[in-house]
Image (cartoon, rainbow, N blue to C red):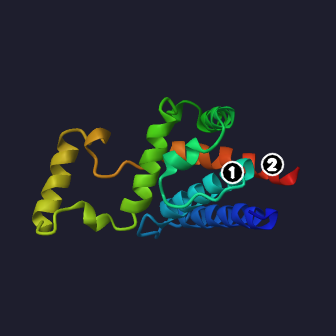
Amino acid sequence: MSELRTKLMAREAERLRADAEVLKGRATSQSHGAYLLDLLALEILLKCCVIIETGQLERGHDYVNIFLKLKPETRNALISAAATRNGPTADYSDPYWLMALFGLNFVRVRYPYEAYRGNMTEAEYLRLGSEWVERGARLEEATFDFRPNELCGFLHALSAYAAEKLAG
């Protein structure tokens, strides 16, 4: 894989992150577009870091498999760097579960309406949401689990790693 292509990947990921920040700052944002842009940036940065270490481009959205292509010491350094980004508001105790969640979210959040039965009525949909809130809106019962603090940490760590390696 060429150095130019790897640099372009890192640059595109940073552009996506910048666009996500613009959307996050808009009070009128109507979708999870910013989150999707961050997930896409995460995927590109993961692949970029793997190319830096192995010279091989990984395909697909299996973030765990892509993450596992990195050397153990690199993974540990990335996890440590991510964990320092947001302090105790982020939980990196199971980084592989987080990577799996982010990969799943990349697929599911693009088509969020597919998470609900095809024959569900709007009244049922609203009732399910109200009942979930009445039960305490527990995260483990949520249809979607975004983990934005953890995503922010990984984005920061991967971006810094790629920038350091590509600068040298």
Residue 134 image offset from top left, x and y in percent: 18, 43
Give the total number of marks visible in the rendering: 2
Answer yes or no: do the residues labelled 1 and 2 have beta carbons within 8 Å? yes
> Which residue is painted at 55% across and 58% down in the image?
38
Counting residues from the N terminus, which is met first, the one under dot 1 or under dot 2? 1
Q: Residue at x 11, y 64 (%)?
A: 123
Residue 158 percent coordinates (x, y): 67, 47
Q: Is residue 154 left or right of residue 10?
A: left
Toward the viewer: 113 or 65? 65
Say which quarter of the image contains residue 68.
Answer: top right
Image quadrant assignment for residue 147: top left
123 is higher (above) or lower (below) than 56: below
Q: Report the amino acid beneath label 2.
A: Lys
The answer to whether residue 26 of the structure is visible from this angle is yes
Alpha-carbon distance for marks 1 and 2? 9 Å
86 relative to 124 in the view: left or right? right
Q: What residue did someone put label 2 on? A: 165
Task: Pinpoint residue 157: horizontal percent, then vertical percent.
Answer: 67, 44
Q: Is residue 138 visible?
A: no
Amino acid type assigned to the residue bearing label 1 in the image:
Cys
As displayed, is residue 149 above or below residue 106? above
Rendering coords of residue 94 (x, y %): 47, 32
Of the 4 image quadrants, the one containing the N terminus is bottom right
Which of these two is toward me, 103 or 50? 50
Q: Looking at the image, which residue is at 22% across and 46% down?
A: 133
Q: Which type of secondary structure does the marked residue at label 2 adopt?
A: helix
Find residue 166 and report its image quarter: bottom right
Q: Residue at label 1?
A: 49
Residue at 62 percent of width and 66 percent of height: 16
Where disc 1 sits, the SS reads helix
